[in-house]
Amino acid sequence: MRFLPLLAALLAFPAFAQEPLKIGFITTLSGPGGYLGEDMRDGFALAVKLGGGKLGGYPVQTLVEDDGLKPAAAKQIADRMLKSDKVKLFTGTIFTNVALAMLGDIIDADAYWLGPNTSPDEYAGKGCAPNYFVTGWDENLHASAGTLANELGMKRLFVMAPNYQAGKQVIAAVKKEFKGTIAGEIYTSLDQNDFSAEIAQIRAAAPDAVYEFQPGGLGINFLKQWAASGLKDQIPLVVAAPSLDPRLLAAVGDAATNVKIAGEWNADLDNPANREFVAAYRAAYNRPPTYYAAHGYETANMIAAALKSSGGKLDAAFRTALKRADFPSVRGRFSFGTNQGPVLDWYALSVARGPDGQLAIRTDRKIRTQVPAAYAELCAMK
């Protein structure tokens, strides 16, 4: 009866191991914005690692692809993941123009899309969809920079952003909130390295402050050239968080010392989830987390909570649990509006030297409390 021990061993294990849930993680990992996607990926991966390769107790497989900041490439990747890999859950996307290229196909396929960064206004109002969630930030990010400029007493604001869909939307958000006069408006290239002409225009306009949206490598180049122009200590920059994150600060140093920032997260926010995240991220990657890393980590934990509630299935129970947002947020308070956009607190941040003498971004005060998700009033979902 030699087969009995073998039979007993086989019966000790389930007949079928659970297939991991595939998550399509389409992000920007190359070019001037490459580190943004890298941080988003690493924050998401950290949450999976801390879960033992699982989210909510269920195994996941993260399929990471670089869109190269090319909308056509992102559309091809999403199409392949939908058809060949049978992916039904997507996240990771950084740039709005990239997201727009693939969102229609994802939503038409009844797949989920969780936008961990700035997301298209087109899907926030009348175009809202049951499987479309914004887990990062909406236009309130940039509107809050307008609020901060008002609080600082600015009367004439010069605005500048890259010439693509999100760039135009963020400028519109700032202008909607700012109470003073717009002293000038410039749109730049997404691959621009030299900002001397724009800086000359700002000098000529002599504004009280400048709002600039130049994320990633664009921001590094602009801030260095801004400091070299001699305007840094004459005209403050009032920006949203993507224009000055910890990696940007490390690259530009003192060039960032007269920058005022509006944001909904910072490494020094004092809540248990954030303290755990910041410590774990530093230990794993030997660098401070950025907003992108925090959003990647947060998005993974939202998925984890929803999978735990739905029994690992991407069904109606998953959507209901996801919308409930019942998880410990690194931002302290997080909820979804009726359009499944974020409801958040917003803070004034600045650059200062810490006890160790190193420059760091610090939280100064709250400037807006639990701001409703942008355009939620136009969404017909309940």
Image: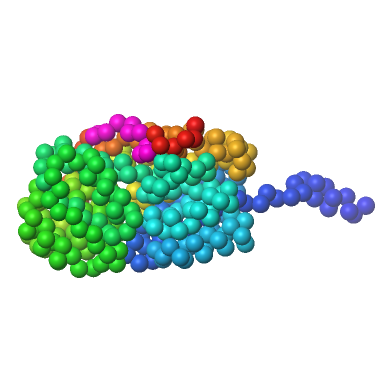
- Which region of the structure is painted magenta? 366-376
Residue at 16% in and 36% down: 151
Q: Is 114 inside the magenta-drawn segment?
A: no
Q: Is residue 130 above or below residue 3?
A: above
Residue at 25% in and 54% down: 213
Residue at 23% in and 59% down: 187
Residue 155 relative to residue 169: left or right: left
Q: Nearer the viewer, residue 104 or 53?
A: 104
Residue 46 relative to residue 254: left or right: right
The picture places residue 150, in percent across and down from the top left corner, at 16, 38
Q: Is residue 251 visible from the viewing direction of this image? A: no
The picture places residue 292, in percent across and down from the top left corner, at 37, 51
Q: Is 370 inside the magenta-drawn segment?
A: yes
Write down the quadrant of residue 41 in the picture.
bottom left
Q: Residue furthest right?
A: 1
Q: Nearer the viewer, residue 88 or 358?
A: 88
Q: Is residue 162 visible from the viewing direction of this image? A: yes
Marker count (numbered): 0
Residue at 29% in and 37% down: 346
Residue 77 relative to residue 337: left or right: right
Write down the quadrant of residue 184 in the picture.
bottom left
Q: Nearer the viewer, residue 319 or 251?
A: 319
Q: Nearer the viewer, residue 186 or 306?
A: 186
The picture places residue 335, in percent across and down from the top left corner, at 42, 34
Residue 35 relative to residue 159: left or right: right
The picture places residue 15, in percent across and down from the top left corner, at 77, 49
Q: Is residue 173 above or below residue 35?
A: above
For the rendered model, the colour scheme is: rainbow
